[in-house]
Image (spheres, grey):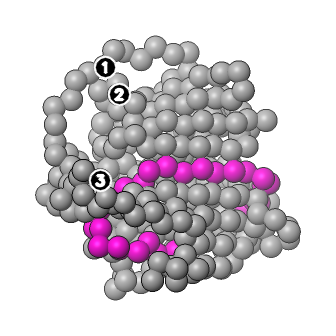
């Protein structure tokens, strides 16, 4: 069964629709008319082209459709995004058509002190139909857990104040969680159904989409630092929650940039490494 899953691959042609691009801009509170057909798609905005077409009747119990290719249940009902790596080899032009290829790259099943778990890695490639190689290659790593591993609310302690030259604070609300989920055709209930998130998964509130957190980081690099990134590697350490402030920071080291997202207790929730031109 696992071999069949690993052999499965989906391929389709996707348009980098000007309408979708303007909707991403609207979600980010940017001037929608600043983005026109023929312009270069801002790096990080390709997420809507990774959306899958999983039938409603075939959704996982948690509502997650998979992105580009369905994720197997494996008897593990809880799903979290562990991280992603995105490499940019070229540009995608707004209005153009790209070939999307998605496949499950790897599945690792293991048993931990908290019970069984699995790590599923999915790879996506976006290739302009006029090009011979992909412009973007993205891998996403998902962690599948048993129902018994549902989160337990614990008391958090504030960490010291964040001190860094480059920082920005964002408070994502229900509206932006809905808009991002809709643009990416992501119906995972932890982002949309507060009752499910709290009563079934034991979470304190709706969870901010991991992809949305990554988008905040790539926009921070693009608009605040005004740098051109070539790749980004993101690791999700802890969930971020709706209506709670998050702080984005960036610091340059000898070879690249290190970014963090801190939660409302000033604890690191997301870590990212970005290479720039």
Which residue does the numbered mark 1 point to in the structure image?
159
In the rendered structure, are the residues bearing label 3 and label 1 in contact, judged by CB atoms less than 8 Å apart? Answer: no
Q: Is residue 10 visible?
A: yes
Q: Is most of the magenta stretch helix, strand or loop?
A: loop
Residue 87 image position (x, y, % from top left): 69, 50
Mark sitting on residue 134: none
- Between the residue at mark 2 and the residue at mark 3, the CA separation in whole angstroms equals 25 Å
Which residue does the numbered mark 2 point to in the structure image?
267
Q: Can you tell which quarter of the image residue 190 is in?
A: bottom left
Q: Which residues are magenta?
A: 68-95
Work out whether mark 1 precedes mark 2 in sequence or the reverse, and give the earlier one: 1
Nearer to me, 103 or 206 = 103
* Label 2: which secondary element: loop
The structure residue drawn at horizontal position 21% and vertical position 49%, both measured from the top left corner, is: 151
- Between the residue at mark 3 and the residue at mark 1, the CA separation in whole angstroms equals 29 Å
Q: Nearer the viewer, mark 3 or mark 1?
A: 3
Work out whether mark 2 precedes mark 3 in sequence or the reverse, and give the earlier one: 3
Which residue does the numbered mark 3 point to in the structure image?
112
Query: Is residue 154 one of those drawn in magenta?
Result: no
Residue 212 image position (x, y, % from top left): 47, 49
């Amino acid at each position: 069964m696992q071999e069949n899953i690993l052999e499965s691959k989906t391929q389709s042609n996707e348009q980098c629709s000007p309408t979708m691009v303007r909707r991403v801009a609207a979600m980010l509170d940017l001037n929608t008319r600043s983005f026109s057909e023929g312009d270069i798609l801002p790096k990080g905005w390709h997420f809507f082209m990774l959306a899958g077409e999983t039938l409603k009747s075939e959704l996982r119990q948690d509502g997650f459709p998979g992105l580009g290719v369905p994720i197997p249940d494996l008897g593990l009902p809880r799903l979290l995004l562990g991280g992603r790596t995105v490499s940019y080899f070229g540009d995608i032009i707004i209005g153009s058509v790209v070939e999307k290829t998605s496949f499950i790259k790897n599945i690792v099943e293991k048993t931990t002190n908290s019970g069984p778990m699995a790590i599923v890695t999915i790879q996506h490639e976006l290739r302009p139909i006029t090009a011979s190689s992909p412009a973007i290659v993205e891998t996403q790593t998902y962690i599948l857990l048993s129902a018994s591993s549902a989160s337990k609310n614990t008391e958090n302690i504030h960490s010291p104040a964040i001190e860094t030259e480059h920082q920005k604070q964002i408070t994502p609300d229900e509206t932006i969680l809905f808009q991002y989920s809709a643009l990416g055709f992501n119906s995972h209930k932890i982002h949309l159904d507060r009752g499910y998130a709290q009563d079934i998964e034991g979470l304190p509130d709706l969870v901010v989409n991991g992809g949305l957190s990554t988008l905040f980081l790539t926009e921070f690099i693009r608009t605040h630092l005004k740098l051109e990134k070539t790749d980004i590697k993101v690791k999700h350490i802890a969930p971020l929650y709706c209506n709670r402030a998050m702080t984005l920071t960036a610091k340059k080291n000898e070879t690249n940039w290190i970014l963090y997202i801190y939660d409302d207790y000033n604890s690191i929730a997301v870590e990212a490494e970005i290479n720039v031109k």
